[in-house]
Amino acid sequence: MPRNEKEYIDLDSINPSKRTQAEKKQKALVEELASKNATWQAKQTDHSYLTLEQKKGLLGVTPDKAFLRDVKQQGSQAQGFLPSFDAEVDWRTKNGGKVSPVKDQGTCGSCVSFATVGLMESMALIEKGILLDLSEADQHFCSVHGPNCNGWFPPAALDSARTYGVTDEAHFPYATAFAGATPQCILAPDRAQHVFKITAWSVTLFDAYRKDYLTHHGPLVAVLDIYDDFFSYGGGIYQHVSGQKVGSHCILVVGYSQSQNCWICKNSWNTGWGEAGFFRIAYGQCAIDGLFTPFYNAQGVVFPG
């Protein structure tokens, strides 16, 4: 269970033998990265101490196969315009910075809600110049998803953000959802007066159109496959080197670099992981560029009242 709103992974609960095994595994990974001249560095993180089952639990993408099948069928259709994009884009600094702070989903499979809420927060900054702190707990536990840590998928989460909306963090702090044995939805009496919504969302397909959108409009939600070595990511341009596939994960793409051939992404594992909670991943890695993992955009953040 979360100990407080800043710290969700309880390392004290990991027995000494498990810690030793994790540290030996970490040392072996560092040596393997060096031997293979990898483009990224490993470090011992809170997440690398977790068991495989715990790691699976904090990913939380459940693909909608029918939706993905339809996207594939539509994939050959022309986009209707000629894309143009910059060589480098990073919304953490672009136009004064339009990315909200990194948060922590803990060991709950709520990554889809963290990514979609992060997208809403970025679009509020881009469209209205206002920094919001929205409630992932409200989005995940009080919507059609229901009060559990099971996975979700971006189209359903974005539909919920459009119709049901999301309240602000003050009206449902994430940590308070875990007060009992299972996650719970806590509806504030005046929730209706503090709901933010999006007007529309859509899918952005193909490399050039994704980069066009990132250049001219804002960040995008994406899904990627996660392998065991990713939990030890400490910086650099990630490529899968070691370990089995653990599951699929939802993140926010905040930019890209043509010179480094990578996407720049915001994760939801707090700032102690990766590059202060962000990561760079090489193009073509971990299915992030596949048609079965399209990028998702959103527009028209609607404020209460």
Image: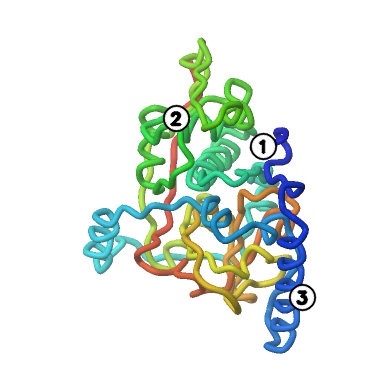
Q: Which mark is residue 197?
A: 2
How crowded pointer 3 is (Cα within 10 Å; few <14, some 14-19, many 20+) is rated as: some
Residue 112's place in the image compared with 82, above or below, is: above
Element carrying mark 1: loop
Q: Coloring scheme of the render? A: rainbow
Give the residue type at disc 3: Lys
How crowded pointer 1 is (Cα within 10 Å; few <14, some 14-19, many 20+) is rated as: some
Residue 133's place in the image compared with 16, above or below, is: above
Q: Residue at x 51, y 43 (%)?
A: 110
Element carrying mark 3: helix
Picture quarter with the N terminus: top right
Q: Residue at x 46, y 36 (%)?
A: 148
Along the horizontal axis of the image, is 265 left or right of 84? right
Residue at which label 3 appears:
27
Q: Position of residue 78 (x, y in %)?
A: 27, 65
The residues tagged by marks 3 and 2 sit, at their Cα atoms, a distance apart of 46 Å
Residue at which label 1 appears:
2
Give the residue type at disc 1: Pro
Front residue (pair 22, 139): 22
**Is residue 199 visible to the viewer in this orientation of the structure?**
no
The residues tagged by marks 1 and 2 sit, at their Cα atoms, a distance apart of 28 Å
Which of the two discs, 1 and 2, labels the residue nearer the N terminus? 1
Along the horizontal axis of the image, is 186 left or right of 29? left
Q: Position of residue 196 (x, y in %)?
A: 49, 27
Give the residue type at disc 2: Lys
Q: Position of residue 64 (x, y in %)?
A: 31, 53
Along the horizontal axis of the image, is 39 left or right of 157? right
Q: Residue at x 72, y 68 (%)?
A: 21
